[in-house]
Amino acid sequence: MKKTLFVLVFALLLTACGGSSAPTTAPAAQTEAPTVATETPVSLPFPSGRFIKSGRTDYGLLFGADKTFTVFQGDRAQIHATFTVEGNVFTETSNDGACETNVSFNYVFDGTNLTFSYVGNSDDDKDCGGRYDDFNNVTYVFTPVSLPFPTGKFIRSDRVNPVGFIFNADGTWEAKEFTYGVTQAKGNYSADDDTFTELSDDKACPTMDFNYTFDGKNLTFTYVGNPEDDAACEGRRSSFDNVIYTLAEE
């Protein structure tokens, strides 16, 4: 009897002191690594104009609004070709360089830099070495070329009603509202290299210089210096502060 009681008490003491096996801890739940979102480059619509290959000074591509383009070096054209654009895909549809046609490239244009990369395996186009070198993840920089200052009728590109300028070969100009033929201002100008100077106007504004670029169609003016300095001539400022005019077809 005493021996049985001793065994029972001893067993109870072991249980109270944790002598039995410790409970099993459940494994910690695994957490998944956060997903990092990748940004898709946002591209502007495909441009026209003159682009110089990054790292070069005299080699590039000239894209026309008529969906033609020219590969040039200096003043010499090397290849003429045609293309189409659908979404962000540029497709060369013909060329005079004996290369396969209907070859497509993804493009991204940020307003200055134009970058091409092959749709598909670029190695499939290695037989066209020139194109492979020019379009295989290559960036071109928009480099507008300015022709001599033009004469003629120019319509402001951001207005619904036709307003703009007439620049005459004798160095006179008129600001016009063309629907009713109203002259809003007039004066004299000179043009030297890439600088247009308004010498006088009938609004008593002082002489002012502007940089200009003309690509054969679009004429763009920007102030030489700070536009704020011309605050007294608000009409001129609103007409020349980074404003584009398009040559009108007569």
Image (tube, helix red, strand yellow):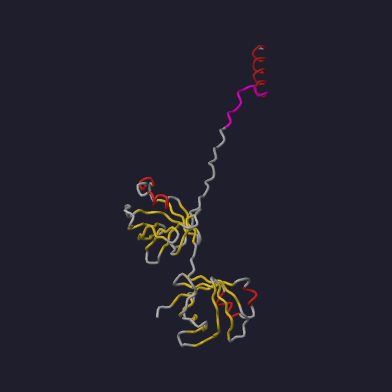
Instruction: Report whether 126 appears left or right of 37.
Output: left
The answer to whether residue 142 is left or right of residue 131 is right
The N terminus sits in image quarter: top right
Decide: is 29 above or below 1. Answer: below
Query: Percent position (x, y) of residue 165?
Result: 50, 81
Taking 10 as reference, is 55 left or right?
Answer: left
Q: Position of residue 84 (x, y in %)?
A: 36, 60
- The quadrant in which residue 227 appears is bottom right
Image: 18 above or below 156:
above
At 46% from the left and 84% from the top, the residue drawn is 178
Q: How many labels sit on residues? A: 0
Q: Position of residue 38 (x, y in %)?
A: 50, 50
> Is-magenta flag for residue 203?
no
**As drawn, 110 above or below 183:** above
Instruction: Please name the residue shown 51% across and 70% down the image.
Output: 213
Main SS of residues in magenta = loop
The one nearer the camera, 76 or 129, is 76
Q: Nearer the viewer, residue 57 or 48?
A: 57
Query: Which quadrant is the C terminus positioned in?
Result: bottom left
Q: Residue at x 42, y 54 (%)?
A: 106
In this picture, which residue range is highlighted in magenta? 17-25
**Foreground residue among 23 and 136:** 136
Please report the residue visible at 49 percent of the width from the left and 88 percent of the height from the top.
182
Percent of width and height locating residue 72: 42, 59
Tell me which corner region of the image, top left, top right, bottom left or bottom right, holds residue 10.
Answer: top right
